[in-house]
Amino acid sequence: MAVPYKHIQVESKWRKKWEEHPINVNDGKKPKYYCLDMFPYPSGAGLHVGHWRGYVISDVWARYKMMDGGHYVIHPMGWDAFGLPAENYAIKTGQHPSISTAANVANIKKQIDQIGAIRDWDMEVNTTDPNFYKWTQWIFVQMFKHGLAYEKEMPLNWCPSCKAVLANEEVVDGKCERCGAEVTKKNLRQWMLKITAYADRLLEGLKDLDWPEKVKKMQTDWIGRSYGAEVNFHVDGSDEAITVYTTRPDTLYGATFMVLAPEHPLVPSLTKEAQRAEVEAYCVAAANKSSVDRVQNKEKTGVFTGSYAINPLNGEKIEIWLSDYVLSDYGTGAIMCVPAHDDRDFAFAKKFGLPIVQVIARDGKEIPDMQEAYTEASGTMINSGEWNGMESAVLKEEAPLMIEKRGIGKKTVNYKLRDWVFSRQRYWGEPIPIVHCEKCGAVAVPEEQLPVLLPDVESYQPTDTGESPLAAIDSWVNTTCPCCGGPAKRETNTMPQWAGSSWYFLRYVDAHNDKELVSRAKADEYLPVDMYIGGVEHAVLHLLYSRFYTKFLHDIGVVDFEEPFKRLFNQGMILGPKGVKMSKSLGNVVSPDDMVRDYGCDSLRIYELFIGPPQQDSAWDMRGIDGVNRFLNKFWNVACDSIEADVKATPEMIKLRHKLIADITMRLDQFALNTAVSKFMEYNNQMAKIAQECGGVDKETIETYIRLLAPFAPHISEELWEMCGHDESIFASTWPKSDAALAADDEKEVPVQINGKIKATVMLSVDASKEEALQAGKAAVAEKFGSAQIVKEVYVPGRIINFVVR
RNA sequence: GCCGGCGUGGCGGAAUGGCAGACGCAGCAGACUCAAAAUCUGCCGAUCGCAAGGUCGUGUGGGUUCAAGUCCCACCGCCGGCACCA
């Protein structure tokens, strides 16, 4: 009888061995595989079982790749360590963020080591390390030199609680993504990154990525490309013209009024004296509305400017209105309104009594008393001059060019994607490496002077004016212009947290290079990332920014690929026991530390996988780990018995072995890790039964099982592997191969149905003919036919026999 | 409102269109034990029946098919994303 499994001894033994003799070494000959985790923010709360899950999944995958194909696996870890929690902690305690951050890193590093994952800490990166952010700043300088970083004064999303400007991506439901405070608008000078210059490439690049369709769709919608036309409307009695963007130029004859955003630059000159007071009041009200109000209040409001425009096709005089349902920063900030064919325009026209002209026939007819807009682009054109009789769907495609030929507008493409607001009025971030000189303007800090070190300050508190705490340090702010040598001031804004995470995955493979961001040779050898594993919450933020950075770095020759992450896997969240998100405030956070101590790392690893499909959210169940723990102990006993007994392989054992290989390998390839664990349990139960009769299973079968289990439960597998008499690590062995012929059954139990209802089962040889099968089936259910007549006989080999009777 | 995803025992979940509920948790009964824990064995969707066996059953209603949890149509519910994008 085997000695009981002692996880504490075995796990610490192998941890030590792996440290002394690393199992994942680059000998220069092995093929490379880059398996990347989304790096964590080193929070003071440490890791909970939800973080574990992603790291376990990636480690199983990494170890599988090591064994299958003999890869050298790049599986690094680092720290996304700039950010608000550390800064807020500093505000409260006065302790420098670098100190609390370092303590958190040390703690989480210990926790990550508990997972027992293969990690090369020599590649570790930390976004707050000057040797790292030197290159974050360097990239910014390159973007500045290429005209992709620019300053702009604009109304921006302002979080009054964080006292910071937010990117559009950081505003959720009109509220601050971090603190939940209602976001307002504030006019400030900001650094912007021209991500819109890459809109098309960001869209096209998605096509070839092996990513979840959901994420690709979210990015596609975020970029929001649409095709249409810009059309110029002359203002009646003036030289001015208003340009609108429309995706429905086919309905141009139906444009019966126009609406401008309150912020539109032509508003003052369009407003007539009689309307001025009302218009100004409306504009002030719109500006003061929070973005939440402006979005949530769907009841249309508006005000007439007193001016008219001319419909360029039919020459009709149409009223020019203002309304906040027109957004100043999409399209041209002005729209032509076709109430008959657009819901919003219809609502507006109804409310303010504006004319409605139908230009697309529905079911070939004009609608007598329109109660809602007809928004389909299908039907024949009516009331549309020379376009009458055309199909609207066809015209929709052709109209942009027709408009362009007539000189009243042009064909255009529009995007929802906006440029990226890249400056933050905070302390704990990378200083933007720019110097402002009165003579030379904004000048990039010369590359040899990078990094611009983040100086110590006395107060980390952000200012109400929207200036960074850095602005208070005169000795740091005042500098000389690198261009003319005259007096100049440093940029005091810092970068958003996304800056470091947008490129950190490139740095791992050359983390200590002090000459370049990454050497081209290493980039060519190890990059891009083969598999990226992390939560779906980064679908449009981090993943879009990283793609943008990579495309830019490709364009300036740093790397030779355009897409950073070939394959993406989003693991689901681990929820608290009641199915709600784990959070400190709810007190339902489950720490892995005690479980590792009580059950062992291998048990927790397997339970993290067994809890549910890896891409799906799962609620943590404290008791579930007992089952996994029982399984490992049971397997330990079977394995020990088998090693000791050294029995001869039977056909049953050989078949089990080959089925197991096929089952586990298929499930790994499909990322069905929860059912892979089920299969391990199933086969283990079978082996336990065999062991009762034979004393164990044969050596090859047990060794095969151990090797298949190794990526999942590396410690116990190493121990058993050694007990089998191997000197080398199990991870130096190769992945078992299944022989389909040996895995195949020669007999199968086949259900026999009458009218689709199971009545019996029969054992059939797999090469039984249809006639034999049907005959056997008929015999099995003969007495159940009664007086019925068989009208149809169905036989699907190995699957089903069905008699249809009447 | 629009776009995704999901809906299966007490629970987590499993099922290339082919025996629904694998595997596990919890529960029940038994064995071992002075006892408990651990371990082992059996049972474990509902319902009728002493039993053999029957009937019903994968959110609801229809449909396709010899056969539907799985495919199609309509609806309900939950979760996620987007949200006046012209």
Image (cartoon, rainbow, N blue to C red):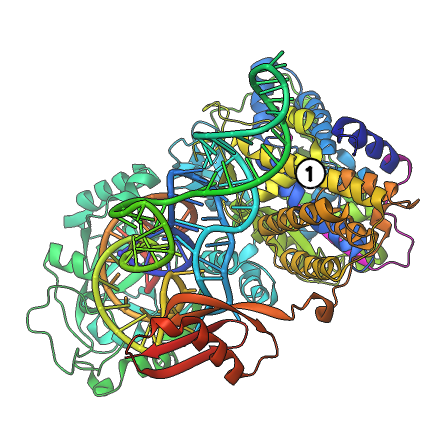
Q: Is residue A354 visible?
A: yes
According to the picture, the residue beneath numbered tag 1 turns out to be A634
Q: In the image, A552: left or right of A88? A: right
Q: In the image, A791: left or right of A217? A: left
Q: Please, what is the dominant secondary structure of the magenta stretch?
A: loop
In the picture, the quarter occupied by the N terminus of chain A is: top right
Start and end of the magenta stretch? A19-44
Q: Residue A225, how many percent across, how many down? A: 45, 64
Q: Which element carries disc 1, helix, strand or loop?
A: helix
Task: Say which residue appears at 10% left-offset and 74% top-offset.
Answer: A367
Q: Does the magenta segment cover residue A27? A: yes
Q: In the image, A53: left or right of A647? A: left
Task: Tell me if residue A581 comes above or below residue A391 in the rendering.
Answer: above
Task: Say which residue appears at 20% left-offset and 72% top-offset.
Answer: A254
Q: Is residue A493 visible?
A: no
Closer-to-camera residue (A500/B15):
B15
Amino acid type, callout 1? Lys
Classify mark 1: residues with Cα within 10 Å, few (<14), some (14-19) or many (20+): some
Q: Does the magenta segment cover residue A514? A: no
Task: Say which residue appears at 58% left-offset and 59% top-offset.
Answer: A211
Q: Chain of mark 1?
A: A
Closer-to-camera residue (A541/A796):
A796
Closer-to-camera residue (A758/A536):
A758
Q: Residue A464, how many percent across, how many down? A: 47, 24
- Displayed quadrant of residue A786: bottom left
Task: Say which residue appears at 70% left-offset and 43% top-offset.
Answer: A136
Closer-to-camera residue (A750/B13):
A750
